[in-house]
Amino acid sequence: MSGAAAASVIELSDVKKVHRSGDLLVAALGGVSFAVREGEFVAIMGASGSGKTTLLGILGLLDRPTSGSYRLVDAEVATLDETRRARIRGERIGFVFQAYNLIPRATAYKNVELPLVYSGVRASERRSRVLEALAEVGIAERARHVPAQLSGGEQQRVAIARALVVRPSVVLADEPTGNLDSTSEGDVLAILERVNAQGATIVMVTHSSEVAEHASRIVRLADGVVVADEALGRRPLALEVAR
């Protein structure tokens, strides 16, 4: 990547999303346009109702825009059928949720393994990738524990490992520190920064200015539109490491 601008992984052009509520049409997104370069760490901020959750759902191919273009890794994905969207979602996108979304009766190992099972990865490769992902987030020794035996910070580490095990082009994080104490928050942000430094593109929704400052760029939403798009004065970590 040295000497040349990184390619865009995400490109949104005039993306709109309208929800129907009874006889009313409610505009959740009013025409959002921005791009995310390979290796960036972008924070999306906005008040409740600003559209950031809707935007993340569209980025993760969990929802469709009403109109507009969404290109992911240079392919138009807004209009693909559900089968192709599911395949791309499983191969290119890792999700980290505020509520962890772990299976309660499954061990950390099994929770991390699940995306690979759905993708048809053979058992021997699944084992090596799961152990690698758990080690990456510093929780390999807790692989046999179920979520109830883990702290909130440990559960979020498992959730991050589950996102990373698919080796995604993009990691989408929805308030990843929202349920954590300050110590666990710092640990999770350090992991995300390290993952970004190793080359992953990260888009993170957060309401916290302090959390957003760990990103290299902040996109601010209000009433379903981008009202500010500001760099934080430092190169994306992945691009810095690649120099």
Image (cartoon, rainbow, N blue to C red):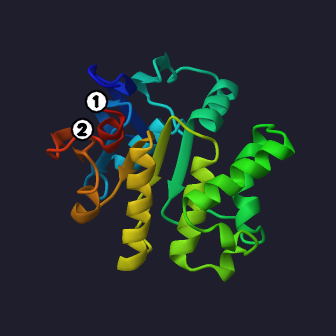
Give the left or right position of residue 83, taking residue 123 as reference.
left
Q: Nearer the viewer, residue 74 or 39?
A: 39
Q: In the rendered view, tell whether residue 235 sits above or below residue 2.
A: below
**Direction from residue 158 to residue 194 in the image, left or right:** left
Could you say where residue 205 lies in the image, as x and y percent from the top left? 36, 53
- Residue bearing mark 1: 34
Q: Residue at x 78, y 51 (%)?
A: 127
Residue at horizontal 60 percent and vertical 35 percent from the top: 89
Which residue occupies the extreme front position in the image? Answer: 243
- Residue 206, given in percent of the width and then of the height, sits at 33, 58
Instruction: Give the image location of residue 114, x and y in percent.
Output: 74, 52
The residue that appears at 76% across and 72% down in the rendered structure is 144
| Disc number for residue 171 | none
Q: Nearer the viewer, residue 6 or 47?
A: 6
Whether residue 41 is visible here, answered yes or no, is yes
Dot 2: what SS? strand
Rendered position, 15 above or below 60: above
Q: Quadrant of the N terminus?
A: top left
Judge whether 205 appears above or below 190 on screen. above
SS assignment at label 1: strand
Looking at the rendered image, the quarter that the C terminus falls into is: top left
- Count of marks, rendered view: 2
The residue wearing badge 2 is 225
Q: Earlier in the sequence, mark 2 or mark 1?
A: 1
Query: Which amino acid lies under the numbered mark 1 shown in the image of this protein?
Result: Phe
